[in-house]
Image (cartoon, helix red, strand yellow):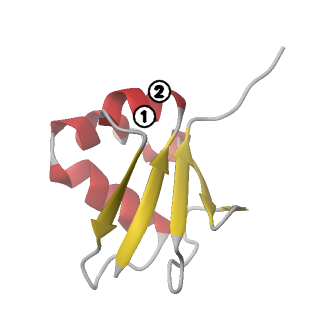
Amino acid sequence: MALNIAYFAWVRERMGAAEEVVELPADVTDLTALLAFLAGRDERGALAFAEPQRIRAAIDGVMMGPGAPLNGAREVALFPPVTGG
């Protein structure tokens, strides 16, 4: 399955790109598996997703939790927690 992944804030900086299209292996079926897959690809991914519990995600524009399924998803946005002030 091909999936568009958008990176924001320090996740984008660590990945070295704002977005990419990734062909996912068949066993990557939820957000938890996606983060593990991205972390295992190279040093950039390992750095960006070293603490996957800190990453927030939206699937097709809807905020989702770690075990959210990816079936049918067109885009996943990954970003750090948002704070304001």
Q: Name the residue carrying label 2.
A: 10
| Image coords of residue 22 (percent x, y) | 30, 65
Q: Name the residue carrying label 1.
A: 12
| Image coords of residue 40 (percent x, y) | 20, 53
| Image coords of residue 48 (percent x, y) | 35, 36
Identity, as a three-letter code, of the amino acid under mark 1: Arg
Left or right of 1: which side holds 63? right
Q: Determine whether 85 is above or below 80 in the image.
A: above
User: Under tag 2, what secondary structure?
Assistant: helix
Q: Determine whether 29 is above or below 44 in the image.
A: below
Can you say which quadrant of the picture contains the C terminus? top right
Q: Residues within 10 Å of mark 2 (few under 14, many from 20)?
A: few
Whether the residues at callouts 1 and 2 have beta carbons within 8 Å, the answer is yes
Quarter residue 62 falls in: bottom right
Cα distance in 3D space between marks 1 and 2? 5 Å
User: Under tag 1, what secondary structure?
Assistant: helix
Identity, as a three-letter code, of the amino acid under mark 2: Trp
Residue depicted at x 17% and y 53%: 41
| Camera-nearest residue between 38 and 60 | 60
Residue depicted at x 27% and y 61%: 37
- Which residue is situated farthest in the top direction here? 85
